Image: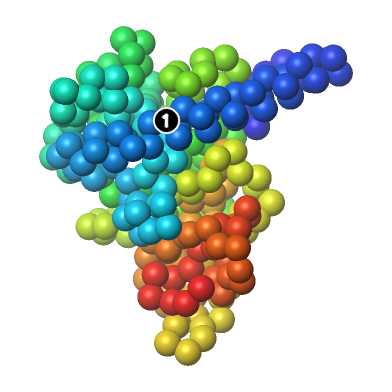
Amino acid sequence: KQSGLNPLSRSSNSILSYITRARAMLRASLLLALSASAASAASAASEPVCHGPACQGEEGGGLEAEASLLLQVHRANAAPDTPYINPCPKGYNPKASTKEACSAANLKYTGNTNAVSTSASHCCVPQYWTCNMGDETYCKTSNQTSNYANPTYWGATEQWWWDALEVQGNCCLPPNPASAQTATWAMDTRMNPSDEGCKTTEVKGKTGSPSYTLIAFWTGEQCPTTANVGGTYYAPTCTTTSGGCSGVDIGEGMCCYHPNGLR
């Protein structure tokens, strides 16, 4: 995940490992502190900023855990008396992006308008695109993924919780088909997950549930998923479970399954 960094000595690796663990703890603490106000700030935006069943609050949902969402509402949290105003046109939401990546996609660049800080930069991304953190090594179309995933990497950008050692940015997936009027990918709401369980898996249908393919796409940082049911794509339901998973466990007990299926 540290692509682009120079090789480190064994001693430096130990220091980096300590810093990485400390960064993860800091992220978790900040996310917990912001969780209550994040939901209210997000609701003030003119368009939804979180997509997939997990964003509706099921078992805690992913609203308070999604870093790319919190990048949008952090300034609103800092000024709770000022409602968050979406700087983008109707049908679009701001996502952290470099100006170059936004221009290359022919989308509106809003810079730091209603952003995290004066050095932050945002691009207006279509509202039905699903975004997770990722890196340029993995966030791209390949021969294996071209029939269902057409991701865009928006460049490595400032992370408000920790500026050092960050080499990732937003990785956004458009719905399938691109003209769909709903998101067909569910964002990964886990913190610092492993890619070990991020595998596309065939799921055999059970009583009242169709057979389908749970497609997992590793962004370099997280694992958004989509369910292919007979050629039609849906955003799966992804929830943390301590018991069995009748769908696909993508890691850390996160069970993803067809929204009309059974866990």
Crowding around mark 1 (Cα neighbors within 10 Å: few <14, some 14 to 19, many 20+) is few
Identified at 33% across, 14% down, the residue is: 117
Identified at 51% across, 86% down, the residue is: 206
Can residue 126 be seen here? The reply is no
Identified at 58% across, 66% down, the residue is: 248
For this view, does 1 lie left or right of residue 14? Answer: left
User: Which amino acid, mark 1?
Assistant: Ala
Residue identified by numbered label 1: 33
Q: Quadrant of residue 78?
A: top left
Q: Residue furthest bottom?
A: 207
> What's the image's color scheme?
rainbow
Give the SS element for disc 1.
helix
Is the N terminus in the top left, top right, bottom left or bottom right quadrant? top right
Q: Nearer the viewer, residue 156 or 194?
A: 194
Q: Is residue 53 above or below residue 122?
A: below
Q: Is residue 232 above or below residue 251?
A: below
Q: Quadrant of residue 37?
A: top left
Q: How many numbered marks appear? A: 1
For this view, does 28 lie left or right of residue 177? Answer: right
Identified at 56% across, 21% down, the residue is: 166
Q: Position of residue 171 (x, y in %)?
A: 45, 38
Can residue 118 be seen here? The reply is yes
Q: Is residue 12 above or below residue 73?
A: above
Q: Position of residue 21 (x, y in %)?
A: 67, 27
Q: Nearer the viewer, residue 11 or 90?
A: 11
Q: Quadrant of residue 88?
A: top left
Q: Residue furthest top?
A: 118
Q: Position of residue 73 (x, y in %)?
A: 30, 29
Q: Is residue 161 above or below residue 142?
A: above
